């Protein structure tokens, strides 16, 4: 079996409500849908989630890059995981960066292979069976301006264990809101995500000091992505665990952050590292070096979420920060099963979703 065709198509999904964090306000999600077709007629799907503030990708750029990638994909054999690794290795050498696009291409290739082998992708990668995962609840800037008590009560009843708050926008208001939530729900797990909000460790320390009576499980990406030394300095000065997101795209970044003693935890995203194969190497390194990891995403529709759920079976994650379908106005895919914050891992061959 070999790949006969690779196509890339722009599509945009509107959000029901704006989603804001420190660097962006999103009203819609720009994607590129990847389709790979085998000579046997199988069609594989992938979703290139494009985050120009993180990976530097845009729709137009991803479509153009897909045309550059096609010669290394079309005509290539696709009978084993080794074949997929070979294709992705060639792309890594011949097409720099473009990790969202690469993740979408890899998804389409693994979808075809899984269908051919009659196995879900995670089984091809020797992942452990998980019937479902329960997502954390993430609040954007807009959501923290509301009365959060009813939302948190409902989420707790649905089994949510972790509540994540985007911070670094209106700090005084955010501090008051978090203090209020702590009083109302003293037992919940609160995590903060600053998305590079502060230029210096002092800004993050000031914010944490104001929340000294609030139990915070971890602080995600408080400083600029490349400020590894600043992260290390901040980590020395606070007991709050530090998680890297934008600072850690791949295994190379992860190793460097560990060497600098800059992090306690890492947010692994397939669109940020380039796909499941790259993520699997990061997960293994975290396990070997006792670095906690969570599974995040770039905001996805069902195609991308199905791919992320395959990753959920490859490691022991502290949390799952994936996209709830309620955030989207529509979805081009079908196949995922949801029950509130609970999402079931697809058990069908390949990716587990269709258009």
Image (cartoon, rainbow, N blue to C red):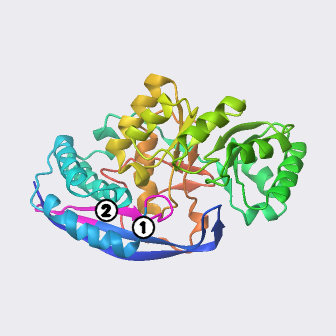
| Alpha-carbon span between mark 1 and mark 2 | 10 Å
Residue at position x 21%, y 42% in the image: 81
Q: Give the residue number, with chain letter if any, for mark 1.
A: 333
Q: What residue span does the magenta drawing correspond to?
A: 35-55
> What secondary structure is marked by label 1?
loop
Looking at the figure, which quarter contains the C terminus? bottom left
- Image location (x, y in percent) of residue 179: 87, 47
User: Which is more toward the observer, 326 or 339?
Assistant: 326
Looking at the figure, which quarter contains the N terminus? bottom left
Q: Is 232 contained in the magenta span?
A: no
> What secondary structure is marked by label 2?
strand
Which numbered marker is on residue 160?
Answer: none
Which numbered marker is on residue 45?
Answer: 2
Q: Are marks 1 and 2 in contact (CB under 8 Å)?
A: yes
- Image location (x, y in percent) of residue 340: 63, 55
Q: Earlier in the sequence, mark 1 or mark 2?
A: 2
Left/right placement of residue 215 relative to residue 73 reads: right
Dot 2 crowding, Cα within 10 Å, few <14, some 14–19, many 20+: many
């Amino acid at each position: 079996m070999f790949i006969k065709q690779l196509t890339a198509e722009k599509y945009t999904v509107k959000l029901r409500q704006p989603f804001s964090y420190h660097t962006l306000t999103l009203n819609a999600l720009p994607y590129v849908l990847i389709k790979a077709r085998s000579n046997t007629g199988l069609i594989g799907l992938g979703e290139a989630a494009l985050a120009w503030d993180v990976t530097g990708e845009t729709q137009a750029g991803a479509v153009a890059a897909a045309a550059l990638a096609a010669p290394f994909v079309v005509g290539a054999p696709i009978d084993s995981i080794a074949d997929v690794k070979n294709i992705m290795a060639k792309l890594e050498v011949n097409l720099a960066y473009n990790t969202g696009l690469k993740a979408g291409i890899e998804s389409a290739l693994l979808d075809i292979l899984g269908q051919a082998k009659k196995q879900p992708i995670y089984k091809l990668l020797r992942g452990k069976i998980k019937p479902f995962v329960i997502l954390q609840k993430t609040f954007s800037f807009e959501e923290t301006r509301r009365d959060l008590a009813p939302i948190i009560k409902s989420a707790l009843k649905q089994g949510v264990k972790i509540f994540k708050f985007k911070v670094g926008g209106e700090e005084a208001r955010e501090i008051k809101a978090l203090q209020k939530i702590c009083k109302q729900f003293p037992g919940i797990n609160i995590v903060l995500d600053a998305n590079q909000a502060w230029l210096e460790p002092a800004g993050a320390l000031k914010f944490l000091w104001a929340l000294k009576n609030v139990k915070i499980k971890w602080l995600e990406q408080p400083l600029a992505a490349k400020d590894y030394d600043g992260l290390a300095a901040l980590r020395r000065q606070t007991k709050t665990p530090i998680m890297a997101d934008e600072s850690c795209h791949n295994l190379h970044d992860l190793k460097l952050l560990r060497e600098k003693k800059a992090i306690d935890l890492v947010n692994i995203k397939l669109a940020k590292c380039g796909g499941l194969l790259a993520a699997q190497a990061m997960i293994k390194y975290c396990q070997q070096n006792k670095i906690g990891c969570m599974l995040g995403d770039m905001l996805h529709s069902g195609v991308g979420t199905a791919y992320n759920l395959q990753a959920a079976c490859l490691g022991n994650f502290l949390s799952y920060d994936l996209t709830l379908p309620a955030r989207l106005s529509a979805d081009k895919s079908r196949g995922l099963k949801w029950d509130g914050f609970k999402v079931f891992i697809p058990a069908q061959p390949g990716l587990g979703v269709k258009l």
